[in-house]
Image: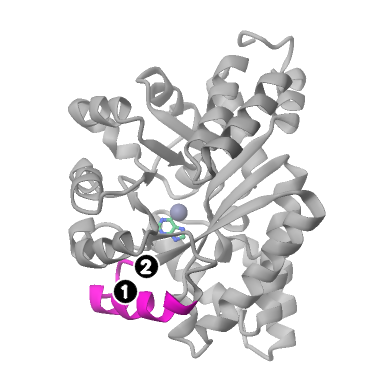
Amino acid sequence: MADGFASAADRAAFIAGLPKAELHLHIEGSLEPELMFALAQRNAVAIPFASVEEVRAAYAFSNLQDFLDIYYQGMGVLHTEQDFHDLTAAYLARAHADNVRHVEIFFDPQGHTTRGVAFATVIAGITRALDEARREYGLTSKLILCFLRHLSEADADATLDEALPFLGRIDGIGLDSSEVGHPPSKFARVFARARALGLKLVAHAGEEGPPAYVREALDLLHVDRIDHGNRSLEDPALVARLASEGMTLTVCPLSNLKLCVVGDMADHPLKIMLDAGLAATVNSDDPSYFGGYVGANYQAVADALDLSKAELLALARNSFTGSFLSDADKANHLVAIDAYA
Ligand SMILES: Nc1ncnc2[nH]cnc12
Ligand SMILES: [Zn+2]
């Protein structure tokens, strides 16, 4: 058994109670099949599944694109402000149950506006649930607008225009969807514009794409965090740079397994990342599609890699230090982790 724990059950209890931040969560990826069915009925939207079991059976992916095809189809049931509220509220209740104290949530507005759903409807539903979670659970949040990288930079630019009236509720921008063939350089101008607006910047890089995409995210987009970053490990000079810059990586173990980024959880590089001095964090990405929320991600990777108490504490500390909270708020969360340790 790893240092600090008497048994696997002891470690599981420690993980459950550990204060956490979640920094990589696509709200549309938290759409559980049960809610998908309920919203399909509420909005009279046809879905190509006869039962919840059939939906779950369809969640067998061999790569990122396999998943994205079903993810974009699934979000088609979201139409009204109430739908976006209910989706977000359900995620926040689950996060609270996992002792998540702060979340930084991604949303994909282009996945909705291209279907005729107004940007304002999406924002109103999500933010109403965020405000309720703050009041009910003391769970704080940031909101990150992701551009779909398979679309053009002009589309991203138009989406940023649509976001301008809502910048009081949007803390940052990100870059997601099909990575290979859509390098960060494609979005350099719109990221520069967002930076000038004072927005925080993140980008998916090195999930399926090469280490060169991670370098582009750093050098051309000037990101504050890297989402995933797994393939950085192929480039030792890049690893040294990420470590020396204290760049946070938002790693998603169950996602990596489901999308075949790793073949087996025992081969997950999380421990290698920590040993290399990388500021890795654990996150759920799209929990409904990948089989678990953040607590399950900690649990799965801790069991497979036999993570110690010190390693789990480092992951939780990294999740707060890598967040976009103020320094004072980060310090308060770190005190809570020290007390828990
Ligand atoms: N893991 C992921 N990678 C890229 N785009 C995504 N959109 C939702 N989840 C994603
Ligand atoms: Zn993601």
**Magenta stretch: includes residue 159:** yes
Report whether 296 appears left or right of 153: right
Amino acid at dot 2:
Phe
What secondary structure characterizes most of the magenta part? helix
Residue furthest right in the image = 136
Q: How is the image coloured?
A: one colour
Residue furthest front in the image = 328
Element under disc 1: helix
Amino acid at dot 1:
Ala
What's the residue at 62%, 49% (across, down)?
A: 291
> Residue 127 or 31: which is nearer the viewer?
127
Q: Which residue is mark 2?
A: 147
Task: Tell me the quarter of the picture where residue 233 sits.
Answer: top left
Where residue 133 is drawn, which disc sits there? none
Q: Position of residue 76 (x, y in %)?
A: 55, 80
Determine whether 256 is above or below 335 in the image. below
> Residue 55 or 95: which is nearer the viewer?
95
Q: Position of residue 256 (x, y in %)?
A: 45, 43
Provide the residue span drawn in magenta. Answer: 147-165
**Magenta stretch: includes residue 63:** no
Is the N terminus in the top left, top right, bottom left or bottom right quadrant? top right
Q: Which residue is mark 1?
A: 156
What's the residue at 70%, 63% (across, down)?
A: 131
